[in-house]
Amino acid sequence: MRIIFVLAAAAVGGILAVTTAFGGDDNVPPISDAVVQEECSACHFAFQPAFLPAESWSKMMGGLEDHFGEDASLSETVRDNIEAYLVANAGRGNVDPQNPPLRITELRWFKSEHSEREAQRMMERLDVKSLLSCGACHQGAERGIYDDD
Amino acid sequence: MKRLLLVGAALALVATTNVQAGPREDIVALLMAEASAEDAAFAGFSGERGQILFSSNFNTGKPETPSCTSCHSTSPQNMGETRAGKPIEPIAVSKTPERFTDPEKVEKWFRRNCRSVIGRECTALEKGDFITYMMSQ
């Protein structure tokens, strides 16, 4: 899965300088759309699109009225634009198109990178309440840099 | 016609009593007109009703968010926190002066949060009461 993300980073980055800048194992291209950044970060860390495949983003953006237990609805235009951006910059992966994963924290690579004991220790030490607060431990998270562990 | 007159009266009342004109006052004025149109007996917003709205446990919306206080903390003066762990600036106007000044944001967050907490959209009366309470905080 990690390799797929590096490939996605390379594909989106396009030029060598960019791929080198994101050349670490766990890095992804940062969000480059101001509206996506603003809307997706209103309630939680704005996860970069490479973390989920296109099918996941489409399903998620089609169900914002119940977004993990909250209404996160948007105007139609904003919703459409955000979905288009997420899909265009999505990660790759074979998923069941009828039932694509929605929670990044439940993906296999995420779990293996955040073993329960280690993640819990970090969260206690830094007083972090949610695994979704990527930037609490990964200081470059907003820039897509996650290889600091 | 009676209703129209009431709306006019409400707007006139706003125009004459609102010494502090500004985007927040404009939002409240529009809500007043809407509230009058919704209920001919509308007699103004109430911060006390707003306080009740803020602190009530509705249990009619999504189970994760039974009350405004689920995320905004029990005092409007305090920082809140989203379920995903992101800090929320206090909603009391005295603490966060830009609260309720952007009509689009006001509309978006009342729509989302009333549906999440109460399970339906809020009435103009509820929105006006809520803002009135937050303006007193």
Image (tube, coloured by chain):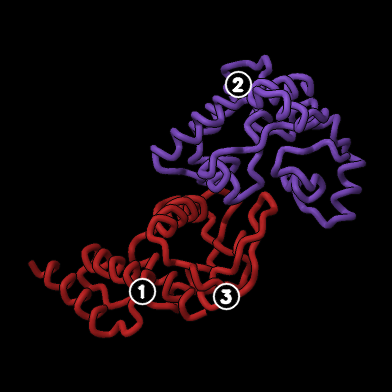
Chain colours: A purple, B red
Total tally of numbered discs in the picture: 3
Give the position of the C terminus of chain A as an image quadrant.
top right
The residue wearing badge 1 is B22
Contact? badges 3 and 1 (CB < 8 Å) = no
**Residue B33 sits above or below residue A42 on the image:** below
Query: Residue at point 51% right, 73% down?
Result: B97
In percent of width and height, residue A147 lies at 83, 36
| Nearest to the observer: residue A75 or residue A81 | A81
**Residue A70 sits above or below residue A19 on the image:** below
**Residue B2 sits above or below residue B15 on the image:** above
**On residue B95, which mark appears?**
3
Give the position of the N terminus of chain A as an image quadrant.
top right
Q: Is residue A86 left or right of residue A95?
A: left
Chain containing the residue with disc 2: A
Query: As shown in the figure, which amino acid type bears the numbered disc 1?
Result: Gly
Query: Residue at point 55% right, 25% down?
Result: A88
In percent of width and height, residue B113 lies at 49, 54
The residue wearing badge 2 is A99
Q: CA distance from mark 3 to mark 1?
A: 18 Å
Q: Residue furthest left?
A: B1
Q: Is residue A16 left or right of residue A102?
A: right
User: Label 3 neighbourhood size at 10 Å, few (<14), some (14-19), many (20+)?
Assistant: some
In percent of width and height, residue A57 lies at 57, 29
Query: As shown in the figure, which amino acid type bears the numbered disc 2?
Result: Asn
Q: Is residue A35 left or right of residue B82?
A: left
| Nearest to the observer: residue A131 or residue A90 | A90
**Residue A22 sits above or below residue B65 on the image:** above
